[in-house]
């Protein structure tokens, strides 16, 4: 152990085997406090963190399940330029880009159909997305 002068003129004991954080915690903790109380507090903190993590994971699982339920469903997407794309939902990403397979393009409601195949629609051009109930499942995927 080394003894060094603190800035306020009092001497402080520095233990090279303990890191600075442990030494600071010892200075803040009164000597008469029971160490079991500290362990319980740490356990409660860890429990709170675990509960928060579980809540986040549960929320993420619900979102993931929702996305899985959309797979191979017929979707109708309106775009900012007025086009309407219909196709089977394949995937999306963090930027809200959407991929449709067996997609067709319509310039207006009831307009002429143009077959496109596999398309990726950038999220910034999507105005609305809706599921087409009458064509719920793709005949190619069961």
Image: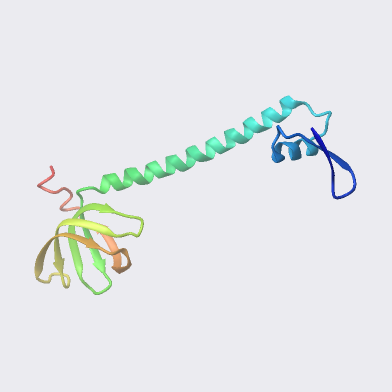
In the image, 82 versus 98, the foreground residue is 98
In the image, 136 versus 106, the foreground residue is 106
| Extreme-bottom residue of the structure | 81
Residue at left 75%, top 40%? 24
Residue 121 place in picture, x, y as percent: 25, 63
Residue 49 place in picture, x, y as percent: 56, 38
Q: Which quarter of the image is occupied by the C terminus?
A: top left
Q: Which quarter of the image is occupied by the N terminus?
A: top right
The coloring applied to the image is rainbow
Q: How many marks?
A: 0
Q: Is 139 positioned to the left or the right of 47 in the image?
A: left
Q: Quadrant of residue 40?
A: top right
| Extreme-right residue of the structure | 9
Residue at left 15%, top 52%? 135
Residue 37 place in picture, x, y as percent: 73, 28
Residue 139 place in picture, x, y as percent: 10, 47
In the image, 27 versus 142, the foreground residue is 27
Q: Is 98 positioned to the left or the right of 41 in the image?
A: left
Residue at left 19%, top 64%? 85
Q: Is 129 positioned to the left or the right of 109 in the image?
A: right
Residue at left 15%, top 69%? 106
């Amino acid at each position: 152990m080394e003894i060094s002068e603190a800035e306020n003129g009092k001497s402080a004991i520095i233990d090279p085997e303990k890191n600075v954080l442990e030494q600071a915690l010892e200075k803040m903790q009164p000597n008469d406090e029971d160490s079991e109380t500290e362990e319980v507090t740490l356990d409660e903190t860890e429990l709170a963190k675990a509960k928060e993590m579980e809540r986040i994971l549960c929320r993420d699982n619900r979102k993931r399940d929702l996305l899985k339920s959309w797979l191979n469903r017929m979707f109708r997407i309106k775009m900012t330029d007025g086009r309407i794309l219909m196709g089977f939902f394949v995937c999306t990403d963090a930027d809200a880009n959407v991929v449709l397979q067996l997609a067709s393009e319509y310039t207006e409601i009831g307009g002429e159909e143009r077959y496109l195949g596999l398309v990726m629609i950038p999220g910034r051009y999507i105005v609305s997305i809706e599921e087409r109930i009458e064509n719920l499942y793709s005949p190619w995927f069961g």
